[in-house]
Image: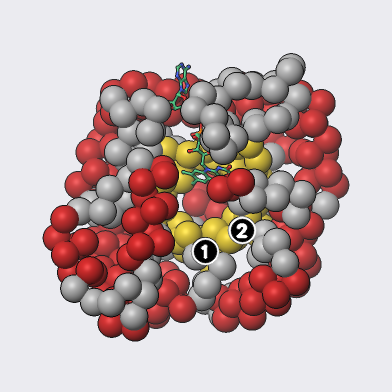
Amino acid sequence: MKLRDIYQQSDRPVLSIEIFPPKTPKGRSHLEKELKRLMRYPVGFVSVTYGAGGGAQSNTLSLVKAIRDQYNVTAVPHFTCVGASRQSVRNYVDQAIADGAENLVALRGDPPRGETVFRPARDGFEYAWQLVAFLKETYGDAISLAVAGYPEGHIETRDLTRSIQHLKQKVDAGADMVITQLFYDNDDFFRFRDLAVKAGITVPIVPGLLPITKYSQIDRITKLCGARIPGDLTATLVAFPDGSSDQQMAGIAAAVDQAGELLEADVPGIHIFTLNNSYATAHMVVALEHYFD
Ligand SMILES: Cc1cc2nc3c(=O)[nH]c(=O)nc-3n(C[C@H](O)[C@H](O)[C@H](O)COP(=O)(O)OP(=O)(O)OC[C@H]3O[C@@H](n4cnc5c(N)ncnc54)[C@H](O)[C@@H]3O)c2cc1C
């Protein structure tokens, strides 16, 4: 099913999850177990990252196909412009469509490790809006596109007004929905959503949520992507030993509160970054299941 139809046709908020392609057989069998658990819940779609955090790009499409075949659920590949010429974009999307994909999360990607500035590949794209425009021009309505949004501004463009202008450019180029970067202060999301609506963005804006199960790990991720863990949440979590079950439960409780407040504020859905683990996501979904039934 196309992303745009999933949101248009649902009279309930849409629950979606993100996973990444494991690099090892052990990681693969772990993911299989975790996914099996997660697919007991009403998951609207699963998105699969592409080369995120320096990871492999090559397994995204095979994992997307395997999930679709096994669970008959909409599975959405991500794609970035990192190292991608127009021809390699075509190769990837042609393969995705041949495998049955109807959607793509279209991203620019981060500069490779050790570099601070993003350099487009030869005959490639400098910004995600150009990728979106190219995909629309090439594939029309055959694929529905999601793009990334940044409630706290993107790390390279902290100015929220400019960040919103750049988001508007991606939506005008043809994106059907926005999935946000992780954030922990809902006021940041509400401000961002208000500005987006004011700028004329009418597509669904879906908050991306990463429950904190190990503070040191998520603290590192937030620093890399320019998100912030509010001081009071940090204080609550660091009161427990790092990664302990007490810290995990406190992090999950905070994620349930955060998601509950967002769902009460009429978000079109929530997108949970699972990091390939079911534990926190399952707790969240069970606590919030009355929204998704
Ligand atoms: C939901 C989600 C999923 C993600 N999945 C992946 C993944 O699978 N793999 C991966 O590697 N990364 C992933 N990322 C991270 C993403 O690739 C990075 O955040 C990247 O730095 C920006 O990508 P973008 O598509 O938002 O880029 P863009 O929208 O192109 O923005 C990049 C920067 O350029 C600025 N900009 C945009 N347009 C213009 C313009 N016209 N003029 C001047 N400046 C401009 C923006 O403000 C921003 O600072 C994901 C992020 C999110 C939120």
Q: Residue furthest top?
A: 123
* Residue 230 seen from this side: yes
The secondary element bearing badge 1 is classed as: loop
Question: What kind of colouring is applied to the model shown?
Answer: secondary structure
Q: Where's residue 48, x and y in %? A: 63, 55
The picture quadrant where one finds residue 35 is: bottom right
Q: Where's residue 249, x and y in %? A: 30, 79
**Spatial separation of the CA atoms under disc 1 and disc 2:** 7 Å
Dot 2 amino acid type: Phe
Q: Quadrant of the image for the N terminus?
A: bottom right
Q: Which mark is residue 275?
A: 1
Left or right: 127, with 63 as reference point: left
Q: Quadrant of the image for the C terminus?
A: bottom left
Q: Residue at x 28, y 82 (%)?
A: 246
Q: Residue at x 60, y 21 (%)?
A: 119
Left or right: 9, with 98 as reference point: left
Q: Residue at x 70, y 22 (%)?
A: 121
Within 10 Å of the Cα at label 2, are there few (<14), some (14-19), or many (20+) other Cα atoms? many
The secondary element bearing badge 2 is classed as: loop
Left or right: 230, with 273 as reference point: left
Q: Where's residue 136, x and y in %? A: 67, 27
Q: What residue does disc 2 label?
A: 20
* Residue 284 seen from this side: no
Q: Is mark 2 within 8 Å of ligand 1?
A: yes
Q: Residue furthest front?
A: 114
Dot 1 amino acid type: Leu
Residues tagged 1 and 2 counted as in contact (Cβ below 8 A): yes
Within 10 Å of the Cα at label 1, are there few (<14), some (14-19), or many (20+) other Cα atoms? some
Q: Nearer the viewer, residue 149 or 145?
A: 149
Q: Where's residue 105, x and y in %? A: 59, 43
